[in-house]
């Protein structure tokens, strides 16, 4: 019997060594994840893996039976970035449908559409209404990830009215990618220029945490990307997600206990009691956006290790 909702491992948003990335995807190939995203979507200066390496990983994961998606940059800035994008699209075209593209800006949408390559609308394409979703479908989109700040009240009607053949994938776990900048915040933190960042992101496997003057963890610096300090968690909302008929949940990789988190979501979707490991996050969890409140808020179950089984939905 197939699972009622698919689990997707999102692209690695942090800068890890090549060995760490390869070991991560070895575990992913044997995991209960149905969909696996690979590729650099944050910063083109992160060059531990080249475009050919990402494509090789995608082919290996597809051979292992995973539904694979190659992620493109959200902020392409150079001709080199465009060349890399074209290589990703060409690899998708050559795969015969086994590998898709995640488009995170309109440039990627254009290149994919011209090549006739089906693509996923990444969360940074800002789909907020039916007309926009229909436009992307006409360009070749086969799935979409709602914007990270989208509440249930926006996602539910868009999912219900989505074009035929369009899957809905909701971001359900991880530090929330909030914004991008042409400036590198991690380099600035160390008093370095972006073009001479010395790859300091490698020293921070889950980003650099920022706190308010009162000492509350607030944001995470991840190179040119700003993220939440807390981990967004919709584990307790799985019954509601099942009721809505959402197609897939995206879990964003982290350096600690990620596959324990994946196991918890897998257990929950099968109707078994599930809980998150207590040590999986140093800064707590949040779910405010889902409930239409401030993103940092915790509205649902206070203790994510005590979650009602999805079979009770």
Image (spheres, grey):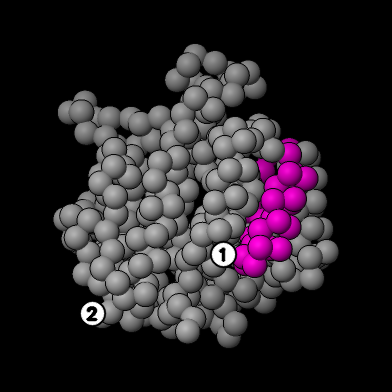
Q: Is residue 194 magenta?
A: no
In the image, residue 161 lies at what x, y percent? 47, 84
Residue at position x 28%, y 30% from top? Answer: 211
Number of numbered tags placed on the structure image: 2
Determine the image quadrant of residue 125.
Answer: bottom right
Rendered position, 145 above or below 216: below
Q: Residues within 10 Å of mark 1 (few under 14, many from 20)?
A: many
Q: Is residue 151 left or right of residue 123?
A: left
In the image, residue 16 lies at what x, y percent? 56, 35
Split into 4 quadrants, where in the image is the C terminus? bottom left
In the image, residue 77 lies at what x, y percent? 68, 39
SS class, disc 2: helix
SS class, disc 1: strand
In the image, residue 252 lies at what x, y percent? 46, 52
Residue toward you, 248 or 228: 248
Rendered position, 54 above or below 203: below
Question: Residue 312, labelled with which disc?
Answer: 2
Rendered position, 312 above or below 52: below
Q: Is residue 64 magenta?
A: yes
Q: Mark 2 and mark 1 in contact (Cβ < 8 Å)?
A: no
Question: Residue 303, labelled with which disc?
Answer: none
Rendered position, 208 above or below 265: above
Region in magenta: 50-78
Residue at position x 51%, y 63% from top? Answer: 33
Residue under pointer 1: 35
Question: Which circle's residue, 1 or 2, is located before the other in the chain?
Answer: 1
Residue toward you, 148 or 47: 47
Residue at position x 66%, y 63% from top? Answer: 64
Q: Is residue 287 left or right of residue 202?
A: left
Q: Is residue 222 left or right of residue 229?
A: right
Determine the image quadrant of residue 261.
Answer: bottom left
């Amino acid at each position: 019997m197939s699972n009622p909702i698919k689990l997707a491992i999102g692209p690695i948003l942090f800068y890890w060594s090549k060995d760490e990335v390869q070991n991560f995807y070895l575990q992913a190939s044997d995991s209960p994840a149905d969909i696996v995203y690979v590729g650099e979507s944050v910063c083109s200066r992160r060059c531990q893996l080249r475009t050919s390496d990402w494509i090789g990983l995608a082919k290996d994961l597809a051979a292992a039976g995973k539904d694979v998606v190659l992620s493109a940059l959200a902020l392409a800035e150079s001709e080199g970035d465009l060349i890399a994008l074209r290589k990703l699209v060409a690899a998708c075209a050559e795969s015969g449908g086994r590998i898709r593209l995640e488009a995170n800006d309109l440039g990627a949408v254009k290149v994919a559409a011209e090549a006739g390559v089906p693509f996923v609308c990444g969360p940074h394409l800002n789909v907020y209404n039916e007309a926009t979703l229909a436009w992307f479908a006409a360009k070749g989109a086969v799935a979409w990830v709602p914007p990270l700040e989208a509440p249930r009240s926006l996602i539910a009607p868009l999912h219900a009215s989505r074009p035929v053949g369009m899957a809905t994938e909701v971001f359900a776990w991880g530090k929330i990618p909030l914004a991008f900048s042409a400036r590198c915040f991690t380099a600035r933190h160390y008093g370095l220029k972006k073009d001479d960042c010395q790859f300091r992101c490698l020293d921070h496997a889950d980003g650099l945490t920022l706190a308010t003057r009162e000492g509350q963890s607030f944001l995470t610096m991840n190179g040119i990307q700003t993220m939440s300090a807390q981990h967004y968690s919709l584990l307790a909302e799985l019954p509601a997600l099942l009721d809505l008929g959402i197609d897939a949940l995206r879990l964003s990789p982290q350096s600690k206990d990620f596959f324990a988190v994946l196991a918890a979501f897998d257990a929950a979707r099968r109707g078994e009691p599930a809980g998150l490991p207590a040590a999986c996050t140093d800064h707590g969890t949040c779910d405010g956006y889902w409930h239409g409140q401030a993103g940092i808020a915790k509205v649902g179950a206070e203790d994510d290790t005590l979650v009602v089984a999805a079979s009770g939905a």
